Amino acid sequence: MSNFLSQIASKNQHLIQFLLESGKPIKIELGSSQKRMEGWITMDLDPKSDLCMDLSQPLPFPDNCVEEIYSSHLFEHFSFPDPMLNLLSECYRILKPGGFFKIAVPNARIYIESYQNPEQFDPQKYCLYTPAYHYHSKIDFINYIADMDGHHRYLFDEENLLKVIAHGGFENVKLRDFEPGLDLESRKHESIYAEAIKPGASYPVTAIFKSEQKPKLKTPVCLMIFNRPDTTQQVFNVIRQVKPEKLLVIADGPRLDVVGEVEKCAATRAIINQVDWDCEVLTNYSEINLGLRHRVSSGLNWVFNTVEEAIILEDDCLPDVSFFRFCAELLERYRHEPNIMTISGNNFQSRQNHQQVSYYFSRYNHIWGWATWRRAWKLYDLDMKLWPGIRDSNGLEKILEHSAENVADCAEVFQAAYEGFNTWDYAWTFACWVHGGLTIFPHVNLVSNIGFREDATHTTDESPLANLPTKPMIFPLQHPTVVMRNPQSNNLTEAIMFSSILYENISHLRLKEINLLLFLDWTKEEEQLYSQLSAVIKTLVNHPDKGQIKLLIDHQEMSAEEADLMLSSMMMNLLMEDELNVEQGPDISLVGQLTQPQWSNLLSVAQGCIRLESENLAVINALDADKIPQFPLEQLLDWRGLQLKNNHWELWKLKDKNYIAFPDWKQPEETLYLELANLFQLVASLPNKNSIIVYLNSHNISDEDANLILSSIFMNLFMEMEVDITEGLEIILTGQLSDLQSQALCSRLTARIILEHEDKIAISSMGEKLLPIWVIPEESVAHP
């Protein structure tokens, strides 16, 4: 026996050596002894295989040498997690970067569903291995696949198969179709097929920009314009920052019956003449008015007859500059993935932002700033010829999988689009759904729609989705390991986009620029409630931004009548005893029973939650209200309203004197330490230090790393001086700021502190306003 094993080992060693030295691509089929495919090496415990070995042991290949690995009906024979994950790990190790891993396993769902619907199950088709089939009752259909005469150790369905593969470190994990010549025809009816890629060389993200100093976007940009020169100018200014090599512009013609529109259209088109970088500008201008439906659809047909892929913006979709790199990298990454059809710059779920990855996949597609490929757009059909068949066969229910209300809502809008409603985008959504397309959404919102106003075509009414703030995307991107839509996000999108209740009922709250939530514990004694509420109202009455503040007090655990009576009584006492003047604000409203979608929407637009020592934690936790910014009452006066140019407001910590410095965090540790220590000592020595805030720009360093550096500086200063200089000293890291945030913050700054070594790129992002400068260590203020 030992001689036989020795011969097997010698044979394996010689074959592997030959394969490695031949220089030819190595393709391995695991768990098979039958030679089915030319050029493939079989590996199994069966001596008839090319390489005879125990697959629960390490595979006898060096790292990064195999082009492709395939297995059919093998992994269900391994227990999870081990040795199954050991084998996956070995496959990952020996595959070259960019190498493919393809798999077929039995679909256990077929057998489990047979228990509920035995009349629809054919054992002669699905239970062919007779030694494992012992029928006594319908439970034995499940026993067949679960045990397989003692050979099976694990069950797979379409969802857990992808997640198991992702455990091995693979990327682009997704289901695939049956492949003739690769997969066994005899097992097609009972199998699930999937594939994945070892990350690396086959996904090189080529240089998106020609140089870091002067960005040059290689991906074509499409800009759709009409009659709004003001918003078009804002969008164009951001496009100018990335300097695309190719700019394609679509414009509709003026409506002759609208006074002044000829001039507005001309002024809007003139903005394109401001291109002052090396750029190929292509225009598709209509001299007559085609209307939104036909102008956009025909224009995008022109775009994708001209280029293979493009980033698309309308004249009222204002992007953060990182939106372009986000789209460019993912256009390249998923260029040959037919089930990915759209890359969106929108995230309307501001409190559900999937921080562990940079983006996620969804059924829905938002088109306020997006990107796609010619291969996807060719599936677009403005006339929606497939709709009657889908409608009449209840195909929409199969696509949406649940929620009759959402099916009815979608059927209504698709029918309207089919009948010629003046829009183009419903047909795009329909095309994506019919072809099983997925949309990529970023984990932060990258584009803000600034066009909700009277001169818009459709977005004429107020909306909680108007003027949403943007945040920059952090690079390098963190990619999901599995290409699969996120059910939780789909459900929330349905609530936000398709719930008519949401928009009908939230308007009664009459939200203002700054909306703050308060969750009182109404079970407390009336005296304690009065004390808490009076403290909140007194604080807000003295707040500098009281005229913009709306206080929303939750009372869902108390009737509206009781809560209103108690609030009215408290307000009357405050007005009489404390002589408070609330005419200038804040506005105060009670918030009662809202639906979950309404709460999600309210939380997404609220600036924060006022925290008290005693509050209704059960409601806060149930609503995830602790996910929005939290403001302890005693600190609330230090937080001031900051109005962004898109009319969105945020609360920032500001005092009488607000300074900013731009340290170059890439400097040697000793240099950085000396500069910041000098700065902190100087500010700490000032008599008015309690009224000063120093912001440190930290756009290119994580908060964790920056705080570690600051802690080290403060500790060393304490040891040297035996004085805690942090007392009364307020240092705040800016983190990643959008352009709008940078410009708004700049408007509230007192001066910029000059350091010897500074981050010049960050300084340039603060807008055009020239700040007074404070030179360290001379302690003088000079005005430029």
Image: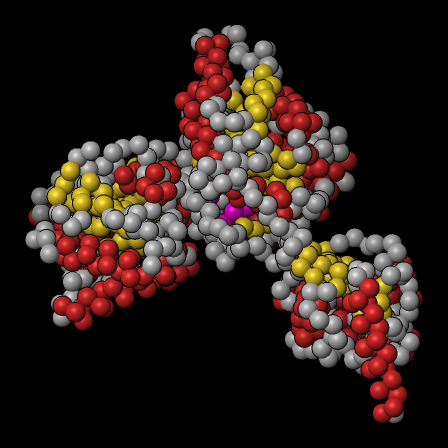
Splitting the image into 4 quarters, where does residue 704 fall? bottom left
Residue 392 quadrant: top right
Q: Residue at x 59, y 22 (%)?
A: 282
Q: How is the image coloured?
A: secondary structure
- Nearest to the observer: residue 174 or residue 561: 174
Q: Quadrant of the N terminus?
A: bottom right
Left of 518 or right of it: where is 723?
left
Q: From where the camera sits, is residue 20 visible?
A: yes
Bounds of the magenta span? 440-445
Picture residue at 75% right of the left edge, 30% below the top: 385
Task: Give the side of residue 321 with respect to residue 429, left or right.
Answer: left
Instruction: List x then y, in percent, for residue 474.
Output: 46, 50
> Residue drawn at (34%, 62%), measured in percent from left and top?
617
Placement of 240 over or under 670, stated as above or below: above
Residue at 67%, 34% (x, y): give it: 308
Q: Is residue 260 left or right of residue 308?
A: left
* Residue 144 in which image quadrant: bottom right
Q: Nearer the viewer, residue 696 or 514?
A: 696
